[in-house]
Image (spheres, rainbow, N blue to C red):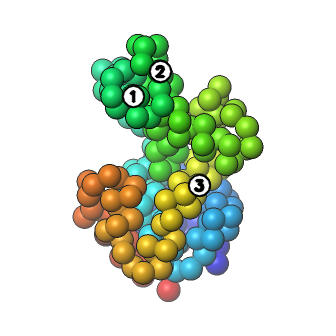
Amino acid sequence: MPITAQQLLQILPNASTKAGVFVPGLNACMGKYAIITRLRMAAFIAQIGHESGQLRYVRELGGDAYLAKYDTGKHAQRLGNTPAADGDGQKYRGRGLIQVTGRDNYEACSEALFGDSRLLATPELLEQPVYASLSAGWYWHRAGLNKLADSGDFLAITKKINGGTNGLEDREALYKRALEVLQ
């Protein structure tokens, strides 16, 4: 079942006019990645809603000092960024509705979405609503989150996306609202 702009606004009221802009991309994404049941859709929308500040942010916030952690050192290395202070942290900062971060993730996402490595040259594509949505669906699929959604394990989904439980209360409130709206 596709989601409407009205339903999306009921779940993510702070999305404002962004809801209508994202509906086509979200519906394409959810169809492509089998996020088509009430439980899957509710969990997906709650998670992307939290991660994106209710569709307001498709690019990770933070200045050069904050993004430096992605540019050099062990964290940068784990993400596949070069060890030199060459701007990889800024270039491959988190983008999309579920923040794709780091060169390795951009490359994997690009191969999955386009069959080539275009995101390495144009990472900003993930800031466009359709690709921001599709990249979130790709991540969701890659992490096996439909199975967790089917079993109602929202906490495990949060940990897979966030690496912890940051924002859990907000995510759970969005999930509850989504379940009500998607009856």
Q: Residue at x 41, y 28 (%)?
A: 77
- Name the front one of labels 3 and 1: 1
Amino acid at pointer 2:
Thr
Local secondary structure at mark 2: loop
Give the camera-side residue of 104 and 139: 104
Labels 1 and 2 touching (C-beta < 8 A):
yes
**Residue 38 picture location, percent across and down:** 52, 80
**Looking at the image, which residue is at 48% across and 31% down?**
80
Q: Which mark is residue 164?
A: none
Q: Residue at left 56%, top 61%? A: 141
User: What is the CA distance from the residue labelled 3 to the residue labelled 1?
Assistant: 22 Å
Please tell me whether residue 18 is drawn above or below residue 170 in the rendered image: above
Which label is found at residue 138?
3
Real-space Cα distance between discs 1 and 2? 7 Å
Give residue 56's position: percent from left, percent from top. 46, 47
Q: Nearer the viewer, residue 81 or 149?
A: 81
In the drawing, what numbered circle is on residue 82? 2
The location of residue 161, given as percent across then percent down, is: 40, 55
The amino acid marked with disc number 1 is: Ala
* Sequence order check, earlier mark of 3 and 1: 1
Residue extending farthest top: 85
- Residue 143 visible within the image: yes
Q: What residue is shown with label 1? A: 76
Q: Position of residue 125 (x, y in %)?
A: 63, 36
In terms of secondary structure, where does tag 3 sit? helix
Give the residue type at disc 3: Trp
